[in-house]
């Protein structure tokens, strides 16, 4: 798996994981990658620094500053709204295939079908297998509960 730092044409940065660099290129050409902030599909890789451990395989993770919260209440509310909008967009533009997602994704990938995206349920094992087969997938974030 390869993690890339990406940027959209509007300057929004984000990261994503791909099974290979070819998989990234293929997904960009098909417009399957979109900015999570604005939805723009004009995506490019950003310059990245290599993740080289300081000593051997040891990695020192820097602890987060204790005096700084991970997210402000406003940021958390914005992220919940973005998750709702992402779900609405997927439901509007993609075909729901339920628990047949892995089977249908393989069938469409093999046939080269890109006419309409699909969404549905897949187990973590099925999702991992699809990724290993070079079939681009993206999990949807769970819909937020207003009590969170």
Image: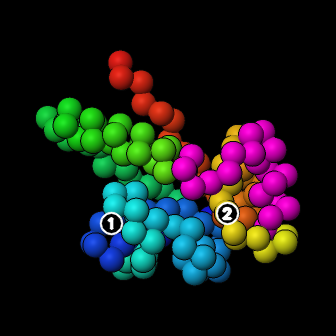
Please give the name of the residue rendered at 35% of the width and 18% of the height, measured from the top-left corner.
147
Tell me the residue at 45%/71% (across/down): 41
- Residue 50 shows in this picture: no
Q: Is residue 125 left or right of residue 136?
A: right
**Dominant SS type (magenta):** helix
138 on left or right of 41: right
Quadrant in the picture for residue 130: bottom right
Q: Which residue is mark 2?
A: 116
Q: What span is colored magenta in the figure?
A: 90-109
Q: Picture quarter containing residue 14?
A: bottom left
Question: Which residue is at 67% across, 63% downward?
Answer: 116
Residue 105: % across, % down = 77, 58
Q: Image quadrant of residue 98? A: top right
Q: Nearer the viewer, residue 109 or 117?
A: 117
Looking at the figure, which quarter contains the N terminus? bottom right
Residue drawn at the location 84% of the way across and 52% of the way down: 103
Tell me the residue that label 1 is attached to: 13
Q: Quadrant of the C terminus?
A: top left
Of tags 2 and 1, which is closer to the observer?
2
Task: Say if the magenta span includes residue 61.
Answer: no
- Is residue 104 covered in magenta? yes
């Amino acid at each position: 798996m390869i993690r890339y730092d990406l940027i959209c044409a509007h300057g929004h940065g984000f990261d994503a994981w791909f099974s290979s660099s070819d998989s990234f290129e293929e997904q960009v050409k098909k417009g399957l990658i979109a900015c999570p902030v604005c939805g723009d599909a004009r995506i490019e890789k950003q310059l990245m620094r290599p993740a080289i451990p300081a000593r051997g395989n040891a990695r020192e993770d820097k602890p987060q500053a204790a005096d700084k919260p991970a997210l402000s209440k406003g940021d958390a509310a914005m992220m919940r709204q973005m998750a709702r909008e992402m779900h609405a967009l997927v439901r509007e533009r993609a075909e729901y295939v339920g628990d047949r997602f892995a089977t249908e994704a393989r069938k469409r990938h093999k046939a080269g079908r890109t006419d309409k995206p699909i969404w549905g349920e897949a187990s973590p094992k099925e999702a991992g297998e699809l990724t290993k087969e070079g079939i681009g997938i993206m999990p949807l974030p769970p819909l937020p509960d207003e009590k969170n």
